[in-house]
Amino acid sequence: KMIKPTKQVPVLSGLLIAFTTLLMFSSCKPDITGELGEPFDKIKGMVGTWQLAAFTQQDLNSPVQAGRDLSLFYTDGMVTPMQITFNENRAYSVAIELGKNYFGEGGTWGFDDESYPSYLQLYTSTDTLEYNLGSMVRVFDESMRIEYRRGCVNTPTNIYTFEFNRLN
């Protein structure tokens, strides 16, 4: 009797080739060495005086979702731009001569989560204000971005982005 070839042989050899290829690629990964180190102190990263460098507005209801640079409402080249000072004791103050103050007159500050903050929270004598952090600021970072999202009945309508430079 003659043995008829079956279609199982190509399937098995295909699986063997795939398994061998997978084994070769998985064995080429380098070993991870070292440690990440201690996390940055988020409070020390925020402490200091920050001066407004840019202000943009994005209208979420507009078909064109591009932001508009409205920095001239805050910086005219003659007066000192808005400054926010965050102290290590969690007090903050605002100095503003030109433009609308979206940060209150001063009070205390904190984060929504001390270990992994997403929001900066400002507590004034009459209100609690919350801002999205563009990124967490470290002690050696020279810039900070904060987003204030305005809305109507829990629907965001505008995003105001404030970009600050560290003065000290």
Image (spheres, helix red, strand yellow):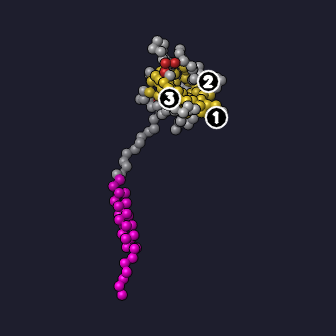
Residue 120 image offset from top left, x and y in percent: 55, 31
The local secondary structure at tag 3 comes to loop
User: Which quadrant of the figure contains the N terminus?
Assistant: bottom left
* Residue at x-position 44% and y-position 27%: 143
Q: Residue at x 49, y 31 (%)?
A: 66
Q: Residues within 10 Å of mark 3 (few under 14, many from 20)?
A: some
Is 168 in front, or is 63? 63
Q: Does 106 appear above or below 149?
A: above
Q: Who's the residue at 35% across and 53% down the image?
A: 29
Residue plotted at (52% across, 32% down): 64
Mark nearer the N terminus (3 vs 2): 3
Using the numbered discs, state the Cα–Cα distance from disc 1 to disc 2 in whole angstroms: 22 Å
- Which of the two marks, 3 or 2, is nearer to us in this view? 3
**Would you name the residue on which mark 2 appears?**
124
Query: Residue 131 colored magenta?
Result: no
Distance of label 1 from label 3 (alpha carbons) = 21 Å
Contact (Cβ within 8 Å) of mark 3 with mark 2: no
The answer to which of marks 1 and 3 sits earlier in the sequence is 3
Residue 146 horizontal/vertical position (percent): 51, 29
Q: Which residue is mark 3?
A: 67
Of badges 1 and 2, nearer the viewer stands 1
Distance from Cα at disc 3 to Cα at disc 2 = 29 Å
Q: Which mark is residue 154?
A: 1
Q: Amino acid at mark 3?
A: Gly
**Do we see residue 59 in this rendering?**
yes
Q: Name the dominant secondary structure of the magenta segment.
A: helix
Report the span colored magenta: 1-29
